[in-house]
Amino acid sequence: MNVTLRDHRLDDPAQSHLGFIDCDVHPYFRTPADFDPFLSERWREHRRTIGGRSRQGLAKTSLYPRMSPGNGMRGDAWPKDGGPPGSDLGLMREQLLDLFDVRYGLLAPLVGGAAAERNVEFGAAMAVAVNEWQCAAFCDPEPRLKASIQITLEHEASALAEIERRAGDGRFAQVNIPPRGLEPLGRHRYRKILAAAAAAGFPISLHLGGTSGHASTGGGWASFYHEEHPSYVQSMQTLVTSLVCEGVFDEIPDLKVVLVEGGFAWLPALAWRLDKHWKRLRDEVPALKRAPSEYIREHIWVTTQPIEEPERPADMLSTIEWIGPERVMFSTDYPHWDQDDPRYAFKVRLPEDWARMIYRENARALYRLD
Amino acid sequence: MARHVVAAVGEIPPGGRKLVTIRGREIGVFNLDGEFYALVNRCPHQGAALCTGVVVSRLEASLPGEYRLSQPGTMLRCPWHCWEFDIRTGQSWCDPNDIKARTYAVTVEPGEALAKGPFAAETVGVAVEHDYVVLTL
Ligand code: FES
């Protein structure tokens, strides 16, 4: 469809982005040896001599390797010292934190391989190491950055211990679980971990990615990255559906879930569909006390990047209205290639109160910042 | 409108580019097979430094499997979200009628003619025996 009314970039960008809270910032290591100080000799040696083994064929890259150098990095984010984008705090400050006077940045470390590690004891050790490394390399020198707790979902005892260890530590904001896993997150065997996170006051962030060991789409392997990219949405939908249908939100009323980088325009449609089927199939899920859409509206937050760009820019407003402007939080995804610039990401002017909520207040309340 | 000498011709080889700042505006000057073009260093999508992106061919396929590389070295790919722009016209690949990068008129002129002025020299010194790339803005 072609529509003539097109406003590709607001010429007079609102200043409401200044001092925003960025809900998706990616820190990287310079070399994998950066984790060594936080590993025991047993696992240091393991890392050096055996290394990570994930649930996919390609052990050292993502399920569908990205097209640009560095596996999908913003072209101008390479530090001069030759390290990978996201590894240089100085450049991160220059291109993101200081440039926009970012109030807080929520780190989403996609490193270390803890979550998908098949040797779960090594995974557990790597999770602890990545958590320590986030603090040492980023959050301690730059308190605006908040760490996300890495855990190994398939090693319950270590996951519970790690959540407990970080509870009350203001440097950590949430527990990070990749949406692609061995089983949907609502399954009973993950319940204790979700409950522990909620009890410790940590939201769960589902940042796209992870490796299930299965094809990334529900219908087989993708040929193109263009095909792979939207398939992340499927894993988000699966997890939202699983958490709702398994009654997790009734069992853990304090559980808060953030969908990071999975898009969001699909969420109202999923809620409609779940509501429709709930009316017909509720006997199967008698634990659900309310319509699925109500659990979603109450327990699910979304981050904006990669932002939807509807052909009629104003459609963004009704989309946000359906999700609830109090559940949408701005994110850049720095330093990835598809990151969003807070000045120009929205092609439609947001109502002032929505802008305040989306750029700052929702994240501040959710993560209890300040 | 003023004319600005932005480079000596030999300074930007075919396939090369030079970033200049004219009246506060960052502009990329490109040499495509001996022809010079200039584009604003600002992507119309979200404002990335467009002229620092890689230059690629135009890749077309009439049917799956029938690929054709046309116009080698004419498309500029944004370093952020990879939108591509025709260096010669500023037209975007994704929406050529509606989305364009701003272009500027450039000519090649002999130093001899330029020596008579008027032009704004910026940082390029003019010698009568050389040719220069002149941008009008
Ligand atoms: S800023 Fe250039 S493609 Fe997005």
Image (spheres, rainbow, N blue to C red):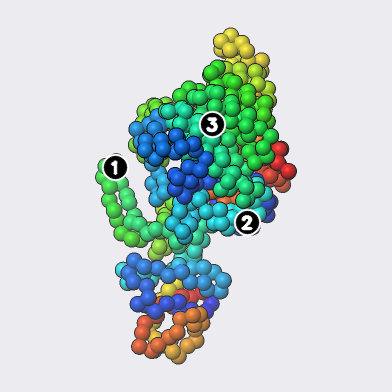
> Which of the labelled discs sits on residue B63, or is there none?
1
Residue A289 found in image quarter: top right
Q: Nearer the viewer, residue A298 or B59?
A: A298
Q: Residue furthest bottom?
A: B116
Mark in front: 3 vs 1? 3
Secondary element type, mark 1: loop
Q: Residues within 10 Å of mark 1 (few under 14, many from 20)?
A: few
Q: Residue at x 45, y 72 (%)?
A: B105
Total number of numbered labels? 3
Q: Residues within 10 Å of mark 3 (few under 14, many from 20)?
A: many
Which chain contains the residue that carries disc 3? A
User: In the rendering, at what x and y percent does residue A274 appear?
Assistant: 57, 21
- Measured along the vertical axis of the image, is residue A297 above or below residue A225? above
Q: Amino acid at mark 3?
A: Ile
Mark in front: 1 vs 2? 2
Q: CA distance from mark 2 to mark 3?
A: 30 Å
Position of the C terminus of chain A by quadrant:
top right
Q: Nearer the viewer, residue A135 or A101?
A: A135
Which label's residue is closer to the chain start, 2 or 3? Answer: 2
Residue B66 found in image quarter: top left
User: In the rendering, at what x and y percent does residue B60 appear?
Assistant: 32, 49
> Which of the labelled discs sits on residue A151, or is there none?
3
User: In the rendering, at what x and y percent does residue B76 appear?
Assistant: 40, 59
Secondary element type, mark 2: loop
Q: Residue at x 41, y 46 (%)?
A: A71
The residue to which callout 2 is attached is A98
Mark in front: 2 vs 3? 3
Q: Are marks 1 and 2 on the same chain?
A: no
User: In the rendering, at what x and y percent does residue A142 appear?
Assistant: 62, 50
Q: Are marks 2 and 3 on the same chain?
A: yes
Secondary element type, mark 3: loop
Which chain contains the residue that carries disc 2? A
